[in-house]
C-alpha cells in the first residue's frame, strides 16, 4: 500500500480540485489549473525522479477506479462549463478540465486498452469514446505501435513539423488508418467492411450519444462545452505523442524497417508527471513491452531523455521556433550516435546513452 500512496495523493488532489471548481467556482476555478499547469512542473524538477511502484493488483485497482470516476467527472465538468460564468474563471476551469481529461484520463484509457481482460479493455474503449476519440482504441495498437518512428505512422512527428500541422494530420490519418485496420479485420472474418461488429460503429455512435445527452440535458451550451472539452483533451494526447516521438525514425533495411528500439522514443523520468500519467513518459519501455502494466515500466540514461519534464516540453511544443531550438540539437546528437553505433555493432546497446 505505501507504494500506491503517492499515486493516490497526486491523482486524488487532481480530482478534488476539479470537483471543487465545478461546485464552488471563484478561486477554485483557478486552483485546478494552477496545480495541473504550474505546480506539477515545479515539483517535477524538485522531487526525486523515481519512487517505488505499486504491485500488479494495486495497479489494476487504480486503473479501474480511475475509469469508474471518469464518467461522472466528465458529466460534472461539462455541466459546470455549460453554466457559464465570468470569462477568466470559465477559461481557467475549461483549461484545467482539458488537462485533467487529456493527461490523466487519456493516460488511464491508454493503460486499459493494453490490459488483459475484457472489462478493463472495455473501460478504456469507453473512456476514449466519451472523449470523442474512440478510434484511438484501434489506431494506437493497430497502427502506432506497428509503424512508430516511420512515415507510415500518423502519430510520429516528423523532423521540422510543427505541432499545429501535426495535430491535424495525426487525428485525420489515425482515424483513417484505424478504420482501414478494422475493415480488413471484418473482411478476414468473411464479413462486410461496415458489419455491425466493426467497432467504428461503437466509436461514432457512442460519441454521438454523448453529444446528444449533453444537448438533451444541458441544451446547446452543454453540447458545445462537451465538444470543446473533448477537443482540448484530444489535443493533450496528440501533443504528448508529438513530444515523445519527435524526429525519431527507424532505418529501412531492405523492404522492412529495423525493429523498434529504445532509441525511437523520448522519455522523461520526472516524478509527479509520471504519477499522474501512469508512467506514460517511460515511453521506450512501453513500446518495447506494450503488454506491461505501468507499474512494470522503467527508464534509465541509456534511453533518449527529454531535457525537461513533459508539461514543460508540451508548452514548448506550442511555439515551433523555440521548440526547434531546444530539440533539434538533441535530435541531431542522437542520430549521430546511432549512425556511429551502426558502424560499430558491438556498441549499439549503448547508443542512446
Image: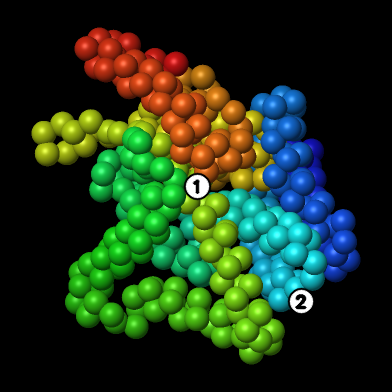
Q: Is residue 146 above or below residue 90?
A: above
Q: Earlier in the sequence, mark 2 or mark 1?
A: 2
**In this rendering, would 17 be left or right of 162?**
right
**Mark 2 falls on what kind of element?**
loop
Badge 1 local density, few (<14 within 10 Å), some, or many (20+)? many
List x then y, in percent, for residue 124: 54, 62
Mark drawn on residue 239: 1
**Mark 1 falls on what kind of element?**
helix
Counting labels gives 2
- Is residue 40 at least partly visible in the picture? yes
Q: Nearer the viewer, residue 339 or 94?
A: 94
**In this rendering, would 98 be left or right of 244?**
right
CB within 8 Å, label 2 to label 1? no
Picture quarter containing residue 272?
Answer: top right
Q: Which residue is mark 2?
A: 83
Residue depth check, mark 2 versus mark 1: number of the one nearer the observer: 2
Residue ranking furthest to the bottom: 216
List x then y, in percent, for residue 28: 85, 57
- Is residue 69 at least partly visible in the picture? no
Mark drawn on residue 45: none
**Residue at 36% across, 21% down:** 332
**In this rendering, would 198 be left or right of 277?**
left
**Residue at 62% across, 46% down:** 277
Badge 2 local density, few (<14 within 10 Å), some, or many (20+)? few
**Residue at 41% across, 36% down:** 246
Q: Quadrant of the C terminus?
A: top left
Picture quarter containing residue 24?
Answer: bottom right
Amino acid at each position: 500500500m505505501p507504494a500506491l500512496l503517492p499515486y493516490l495523493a497526486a491523482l486524488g488532489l487532481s480530482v478534488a480540485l476539479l470537483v471543487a471548481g465545478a461546485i464552488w467556482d471563484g478561486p477554485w476555478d483557478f486552483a485546478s489549473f494552477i496545480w495541473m499547469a504550474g505546480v506539477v512542473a515545479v515539483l517535477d524538477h524538485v522531487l526525486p525522479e523515481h519512487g517505488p511502484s505499486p504491485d500488479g493488483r494495486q495497479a489494476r485497482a487504480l486503473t479501474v477506479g480511475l475509469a469508474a470516476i471518469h464518467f461522472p467527472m466528465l458529466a460534472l465538468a461539462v455541466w459546470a462549463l455549460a453554466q457559464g460564468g465570468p470569462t477568466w474563471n470559465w477559461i481557467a476551469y475549461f483549461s484545467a478540465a482539458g488537462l485533467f481529461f487529456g493527461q490523466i484520463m487519456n493516460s488511464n484509457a491508454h493503460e486499459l486498452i493494453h490490459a488483459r481482460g475484457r472489462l478493463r479493455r472495455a473501460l478504456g474503449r469507453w473512456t476514449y469514446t466519451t472523449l470523442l476519440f474512440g478510434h484511438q482504441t484501434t489506431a494506437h495498437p493497430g497502427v502506432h505501435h506497428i509503424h512508430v518512428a516511420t512515415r507510415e505512422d500518423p502519430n510520429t512527428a516528423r523532423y521540422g513539423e510543427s505541432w499545429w500541422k501535426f495535430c491535424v494530420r495525426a487525428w485525420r490519418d489515425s482515424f483513417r488508418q484505424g478504420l482501414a485496420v478494422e475493415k480488413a479485420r471484418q473482411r478476414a472474418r468473411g464479413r462486410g467492411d461496415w458489419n455491425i461488429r466493426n467497432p467504428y460503429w461503437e466509436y461514432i455512435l457512442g460519441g454521438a450519444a454523448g453529444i446528444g445527452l449533453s444537448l438533451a440535458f444541458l441544451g446547446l451550451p452543454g453540447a458545445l462545452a462537451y465538444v470543446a472539452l473533448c477537443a482540448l483533451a484530444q489535443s493533450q494526447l496528440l501533443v504528448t505523442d508529438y513530444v515523445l516521438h519527435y524526429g525519431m525514425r527507424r532505418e529501412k533495411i531492405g523492404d522492412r524497417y529495423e525493429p523498434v528500439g529504445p532509441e525511437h522514443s523520448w522519455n522523461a523520468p520526472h516524478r509527479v508527471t509520471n504519477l499522474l500519467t501512469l508512467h506514460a513518459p517511460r515511453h521506450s519501455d512501453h513500446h518495447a513491452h506494450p503488454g506491461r502494466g505501468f507499474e512494470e515500466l522503467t527508464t534509465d540514461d541509456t534511453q533518449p531523455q527529454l531535457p525537461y519534464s513533459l508539461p514543460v516540453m508540451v508548452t514548448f511544443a506550442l511555439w515551433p521556433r523555440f521548440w526547434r531550438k531546444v530539440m533539434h540539437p538533441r535530435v541531431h546528437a542522437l542520430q549521430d550516435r546511432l549512425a556511429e553505433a551502426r558502424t560499430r555493432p558491438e556498441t549499439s546497446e549503448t547508443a542512446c546513452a
